[in-house]
Image (cartoon, grey):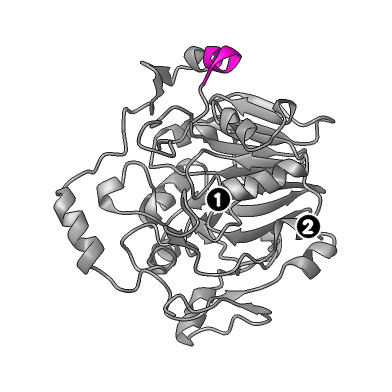
């Protein structure tokens, strides 16, 4: 990776999370396997569930017509897959963890391949006010996507150290803002702010750069709205501190997929997502980080089904937007289990695109 040097290295060394040349979680948790043995995990990989990818096309909708209309409530969210969302807050637009490539992988010919087409291309996006990049893993930082966004000269807000990667991908230094936990950046004009908040995860894009950059969750706030975006994280009591500092959120976007007990300290999964949701003060929960790539050992739709099953008795309000369909949380009454359309158990309605079957 590009080296941390100069002011970037000075800022890293000043971070409470940085010591001995790398960043660390507050709890000390790392990405090592927990419980059981690597052999048991390998056994699950080779002989476990064969439903890790959908056996039919996923319903996907083009958001272009919806984006052309103004939001009636002032808050609209379009889930484009995995952790990529277009957030529209009071007329401002933020794109999170943009992954528009075919694979979440360092190479174009191998690695996790997406289950569905991207609902809209980067060239079709409305004008962006900012890109928010939580950390540098391949399923969050897609090099081809970031190169294309760099040409649009859109500002990007990210975690400490990640700017070195962005400069290598074509972003001008003045377009990059890197934050340590609890630091805030306000866009020119003061209409939108970003605060990097604690997460329990790790970073790196090769065998030699583990934890050379920071990872974060995020608070995005306009004058009337406040959102929480988890990035990647395990369960941490620091979520309670985030709630104490910022209050209740209009929407809490939490990862639920790519989870396994063996790496339960650095990914939430559905059960811990509900616990994190509680620590963050509740509100409306929009699950992310599922339904696009095969990055774990569970059936592809298990995170969503488990979340709905657990959320009902807990009284949690869950939002499950169809891929590509713009959603106004204030107007959504109940979760829509659109993924069941793969099994003929749900009518996804006015879908206009269909993904190719991943089993072909």
Write the residue at 46% across / 44% down: 232
On residue 253, the disc is 1
- Mark 1 neighbour density, 10 Å: few (under 14) some (14–19) many (20 or more): many
Where disc 2 sits, the SS reads loop
Where disc 1 sits, the SS reads strand
Write the residue at 52% across / 33% down: 242
Q: Nearer the viewer, mark 2 or mark 1?
A: 1
Q: Quadrant of the C terminus?
A: bottom left
Of the pair 309 and 58, the residue shown nearer to us: 58
- Residue range in magenta is 4-11
Looking at the rendered structure, the number of numbered marks drawn on it comes to 2
Write the residue at 20% across / 68% down: 47
Whether pointer 2 and pointer 1 mark residues with C-beta atoms closer than 8 Å, the reply is no
Q: Is residue 168 above or below residue 128?
A: above
Q: Quadrant of residue 26?
A: top left
- Residue 77 coordinates in the image, percent (x, y): 68, 57
Q: Is residue 250 visible?
A: no
Q: Main secondary structure of the magenta part?
A: helix
Q: Quadrant of residue 335?
A: bottom right
Of the pair 260 and 71, the residue shown nearer to us: 260
Q: Is residue 132 visible?
A: yes
Which residue has dot 2 on it? 73
Q: Is residue 1 above or below residue 311?
A: above
| In the displayed structure image, the side of residue 3 where residue 222 appears, left or right | right
- Residue 325 coordinates in the image, percent (x, y): 67, 68
Of the pair 65 and 137, the residue shown nearer to us: 137
Separation of residues labelled 2 and 1 (CA atoms): 18 Å
Write the residue at 38% across / 32% down: 210
- Mark 2 neighbour density, 10 Å: few (under 14) some (14–19) many (20 or more): few
Q: Is residue 194 above or below residue 37?
A: above
| In the displayed structure image, the side of residue 205 where residue 193 appears, left or right | right
Q: Is residue 325 above or below residue 85?
A: below
């Amino acid at each position: 990776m590009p080296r941390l040097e100069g002011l970037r290295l000075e800022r890293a060394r000043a971070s409470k999370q940085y010591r001995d040349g790398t960043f660390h979680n507050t709890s000390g948790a790392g990405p090592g396997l927990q419980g059981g043995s690597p052999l048991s995990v390998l056994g699950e990989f080779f002989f476990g569930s064969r439903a890790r990818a959908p056996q039919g096309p996923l319903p996907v909708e083009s958001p272009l017509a919806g984006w052309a209309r103004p939001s009636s409530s002032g808050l609209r969210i379009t889930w484009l897959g995995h952790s990529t969302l277009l957030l529209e807050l009071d007329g401002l637009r933020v794109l999170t963890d943009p992954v528009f490539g075919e694979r979440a992988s360092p190479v174009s010919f191998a690695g996790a391949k997406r289950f569905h087409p991207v609902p809209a291309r980067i060239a079709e996006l409305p004008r962006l006010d900012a890109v928010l990049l939580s950390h540098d893993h391949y399923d969050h930082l897609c090099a081809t996507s970031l190169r294309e966004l760099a040409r649009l000269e859109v500002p990007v807000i990210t975690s400490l150290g990640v700017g070195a990667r962005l400069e290598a991908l074509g972003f001008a230094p003045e377009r990059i803002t890197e934050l340590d936990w609890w630091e805030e950046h306000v866009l020119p004009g003061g209409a939108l702010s970003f605060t990097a908040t604690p997460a329990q995860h790790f970073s790196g894009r090769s065998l030699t750069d583990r934890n050379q950059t920071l990872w974060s969750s995020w608070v995005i706030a306009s004058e009337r709205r406040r959102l929480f975006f988890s990035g990647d994280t395990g369960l941490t009591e620091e979520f309670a501190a985030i709630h104490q500092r910022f209050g209740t959120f209009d929407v809490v976007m939490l990862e639920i997929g790519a989870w396994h007990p063996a790496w339960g300290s650095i990914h939430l999964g559905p059960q811990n997502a509900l616990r994190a949701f509680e620590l963050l003060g509740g509100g409306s929960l929009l699950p992310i980080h599922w339904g696009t790539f095969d990055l774990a050992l569970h059936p592809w739709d298990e995170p969503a089904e488990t979340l709905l099953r657990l959320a009902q008795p807990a009284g949690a309000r869950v939002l499950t937007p169809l891929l590509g369909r713009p959603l106004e949380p204030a107007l959504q009454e109940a979760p829509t289990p659109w993924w069941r359309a793969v099994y003929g158990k749900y009518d996804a309605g006015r879908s206009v695109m269909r993904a190719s079957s991943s089993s072909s």
